[in-house]
Amino acid sequence: MPVETAPIIPTTEKPLVSVITVVRNGAAHIADNLASVAEQDYPAIEHLVLDGASTDGTQELVRVRAHPRLRFTSEPDDGIYHAMNKGIAQAKGVYMVFLNSDDTFASSQAVSLAMARLSGDATNLSEESLHCFAYAPFSRTSPMPALIARPQVHVRDPLSVHTICHQGTIFPRQVFARVGTYDEGFRLAGDFEHRLRCHLAGISFVCHPVVLVRFCLDGATERQMARSFAESEHAVRASCGAWAGWRFRALFWRARLRKMLGAMAKTILGGGAYAWLRSWSLRRRHG
């Protein structure tokens, strides 16, 4: 799907940020999602909500909570990535953020703080040094960031893009013009395959220690981890070869083992002590 390249906005103006939310039967959380976008103090923002013909009252909730920044459509789609691609086609922003229906921004200043990190980077929209921006996400049930990174840390290993939170990433529009939109053949790992494609095309990911979103740990990818892993490994093997596929499998299971050990430690130590220990460990590791 072709994407037009938006003009670079002069530095004296605020670049428009398009927040894209795809949803189907998300009545349980969509109100919080809408409120978190509506309350952003960043002045140049639009919220595109693409509903896949929900049957649980989602449409009515969106219409009741409509705000001036909102553009809402409801029609059947062919999966998450088909809906996301429709959002990209409709978006008018210079930058795009994909905020799932059960996710929210971390605070009313989240977009302003994130964009402030971009304002000093004069090259972030140039074709020669195009890159995306990854921010630290919170889980909805965690009191601490899931990612703590030094400012301006470039993610260099193509397999490491699997660790980047999709909802916590700001994409310049030119990214989709260069590498295309999401592969709709994927059901769960299309965002990973797209980040991998970006990396192989020379588009880097720059991490900033700013919390942008609170994300739900009960999303489709988390609920269907085995299928998500299989799709991700397929993308790695297709793009990087069999050896990279085996390496990705090892990294994946190492991460799963760490998660299981973390859960055991949390049970033994208690939530408060475990949170402090993990926060200390992450800060020590990343400086």
Image (cartoon, grey):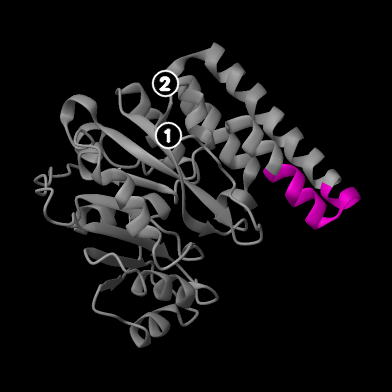
**Which quarter of the image is occupied by the N terminus?**
top left
Which residue ends up furthest to the top in the rendered image?
Answer: 243
Mark 2 or mark 1, which has the lower sequence index?
Answer: 1
Assess whether mark 1 and mark 2 are in contact (beta carbons under 8 angstroms).
Answer: yes
Q: Position of residue 259 (x, y in %)?
A: 73, 40
**Residue under the image location 45 percent in, 17 percent down:** 240
Element at label 2 = helix
Residue type at tag 1: Glu
| Residue 269 falls inside the magenta stretch | yes
Location of residue 92 (image quadrant): bottom left
Query: Which mark is drawn over residue 239?
Result: 2
Q: Nearer the viewer, residue 256 or 108?
A: 108
**Residue under the image location 44 percent in, 70 percent down:** 33
**Residue under the image location 32 percent in, 69 percent down:** 41
Element at label 1 = helix
Location of residue 171 (image quadrant): top left
**Which quarter of the image is occupied by the C terminus?**
top right
Query: Which mark is drawn over residue 114?
Result: none
Q: In the image, which residues are magenta? A: 266-279
Q: Position of residue 80 (x, y in %)?
A: 42, 54
**Residue under the image location 68 percent in, 33 percent down:** 255
Residue 172 visible in image: no
| Residue 268 falls inside the magenta stretch | yes
Q: Position of residue 177 (x, y in %)?
A: 19, 38
Which residue ends up furthest to the right in the rendered image?
Answer: 268
Residue 256 visible in image: yes
Q: Where is residue 126 in the image (x, y as percent from the top left)?
A: 16, 32
Q: Main secondary structure of the magenta part?
A: helix
Q: Is residue 280 left or right of residue 45?
A: right
Give the residue number, with chain letter if any, for mark 1: 193
Residue type at tag 2: Ser
Q: In this view, does 129 lie to the left or right of 143?
A: left
